[in-house]
Amino acid sequence: MTTIDLFKNDPKFITIPAGQVIFEKGGIADQMYAVIEGEVEISIDGKFLDVTGAGGIVGEMALIDSSPRSATAIAKTECKLVPVDAKRFSFLVQQTPNFALNVMKIMVERIRKLDALVLANAS
């Protein structure tokens, strides 16, 4: 089961217009978002890091360590998102092991992109 399969029929979605900030670096991190439709751009201090589309997630680090947001997420296009709080995240990790693996894969991909960004700026 893919991430989008878990959320595609969720009635608790929100619609975010293109250009709107979903969350900002340093902000309170109390939920992540599953992307059902659209594209979300993730940046750190104005530097592009990643674009996440349907089936992806953003803000997942918030539910793992409860630290302030480490990046900014902006709706690149109109987006349909499902907010996921800590209680639901914990339930999904316990009940759907593939969800947990998917979250880890996404985090690893972003860490690798961040490493590449850091290396590119160091030279």
Image (tube, helix red, strand yellow):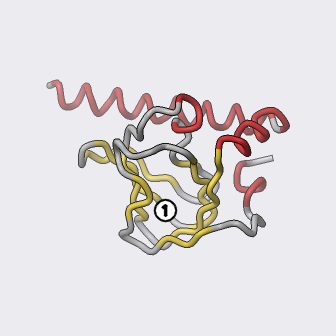
Residue at the limit of the structure toward the left, as seen here = 123
| Secondary element at image label 1 | loop
Compared across the picture, whether 94 is left or right of 80 comes to right
Quadrant assignment, res 36: bottom right
Q: Quadrant of residue 74?
A: bottom left
Q: Residue at x 54, y 57 (%)?
A: 53
Q: Is residue 33 left or right of residue 46?
A: right
Q: Is residue 98 above or below residue 13?
A: above
Q: Is 51 left, or right, of 88 in this rendering?
A: left
Residue 115 pos. (x, y %): 35, 26
**Kind of residue sitting beneath label 1:** Glu
Image position, residue 92 (x, y; %): 77, 41
Residue 61 place in picture, x, y as percent? 52, 35
Pick the quarter of the image with the C terminus.
top left
Q: Which residue is mark 1?
A: 39
The answer to whether 54 is drawn above or below residue 121 in the figure is below
| Residue found at x 58% / y 37% | 63
Q: Position of residue 43 (x, y in %)?
A: 33, 47
Judge the density around disc 1: few (<14), some (14-19), many (≥20) Cα neighbours within 10 Å.
Answer: many
Residue sitting at x 52%, y 33%: 66
Identify which residue is drawn at 25% across, 45% down: 47
The tally of labels here is 1
The residue closer to the viewer here, 48 or 10, is 10
**Which residue is at the far right?**
95
